[in-house]
Image (cartoon, rainbow, N blue to C red):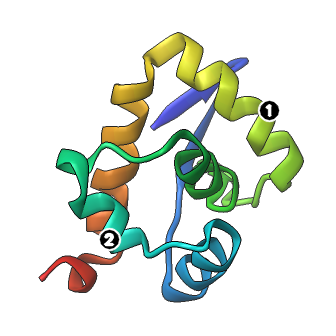
Amino acid sequence: MFEVDGITYTLKYNTKKVKTIELVTKSSIVGEVTKNNGIMPYATLEALFSLALVEEATNDVVKQKTAAEMFEKVVEENGLISVNMAIVEKLQDDLGFMFR
């Protein structure tokens, strides 16, 4: 999904992670996705990224501080809208029931 320094990372969401992200951001993820044509606030995207990032090959969770630093690099390389859309797609893939 995302490559940083030659390592491929992906996002993995489950209901427990979404609850944590909603506590951190103080907002509903589904609510944020449905507002503004799916374009979410920067801080929400950073939380969605940094709390769900795993190394694809090993499935190891990336520490939140490291993932937050990587988020900025990924946004600079890929663009904020592209990262936003990738996060929304992954949320829909992992938690499709939330969007029905």
Residue 8, how many percent across, how many down? 59, 34
Vertical comparison of 3 with 91: above or below: above
Query: Which residue is located at x 40 percent, y 49 percent?
Result: 87
Query: Which residue is located at x 23 percent, y 86 percent?
Result: 97
Residue 68, how many percent across, how many down? 76, 41
Report helix, strand or loop for mark 1: helix
Name the residue carrying label 1.
69
Dot placed on the residue nearer the N-terminal end, 2 or 1: 2
Q: Amino acid at mark 1?
A: Glu
Name the residue carrying label 2.
31
Quadrant of image for the N terminus = top left
Q: Which label belongs to residue 83?
A: none
Gap in angstroms between the C-alphas marked 2 and 1:
26 Å
86 relative position to 46: left or right = left
In front: label 2 or label 1: 2
Report helix, strand or loop for mark 2: helix
Vertical comparison of 33 with 84: above or below: below
